[in-house]
Image (cartoon, grey):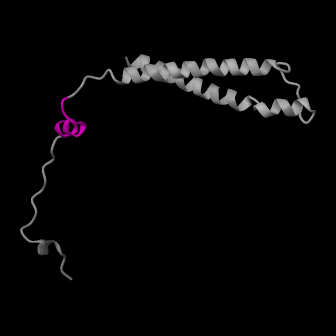
Amino acid sequence: MNVVVTILLTVQMVAAIAMIGLILVQHGKGADMGAAFGSGGSGSLFGASGSANFLSRTTAVLATVFFVCTLALAYFGNLRPASSGSVLEGAAAAAPVASVPALPASGAAQIPAK
């Protein structure tokens, strides 16, 4: 079970980082209009409109992978056995109680004399 959760977390982090990178590389809708009137360079690696299709489809695929990983992690997170008590009760029962040293009868005995 832990191996599956680790793989899902890894895939989710890689998808998130790749999605951030792809979103930052994409141009906005206004960039196409400016390039049409000559105020910006329209040449790109994928051609005039090829980059928008490739980058937006890749972003959609990565968003789907991220969403599916999130749902799977939520499902595996809820598979733990239900307990009848609270988390604090379980922690108190597991922790041993240390013995407290006996205090002197008077607090004045702890004050050093000058």
Residue at image location 88% in from the left, 25% down from the top: 43
Relative image position of residue 69 (x, y in whole percent): 49, 20
Quadrant of the snapshot with the N terminus: top left
Q: Residue furthest left?
A: 105
Q: Which quarter of the figure has residue 26?
A: top right
Of residue 106 and residue 32, the one placed in the foreground of this image is: 32
Q: Is residue 8 magenta?
A: no
Give the total of numbered labels.
Answer: 0
Relative to 99, is 44 on the left or the right?
A: right
Of residue 37 and residue 65, the one placed in the foreground of this image is: 37
| On screen, residue 87 above or below 5 | below
Residue at image location 18% in from the left, 30% down from the top: 84
Tell me which secondary structure the magenta stretch mostly adopts.
helix
Relative to 114, is 62 on the left or the right?
A: right
Residue at image location 81% in from the left, 33% down from the top: 31
Relative image position of residue 58 (x, y in whole percent): 67, 18
Quadrant of the snapshot with the C terminus: bottom left
Relative image position of residue 6 (x, y in whole percent): 45, 21
Q: Which quarter of the figure has residue 51?
A: top right
Relative image position of residue 11 (x, y in whole percent): 53, 20
Start-end of magenta stretch: 84-95
Residue at image location 85% in from the left, 21% down from the top: 48
Of residue 112 and residue 17, the one placed in the foreground of this image is: 17
Q: Which residue lies furthest to the right in this view?
A: 38
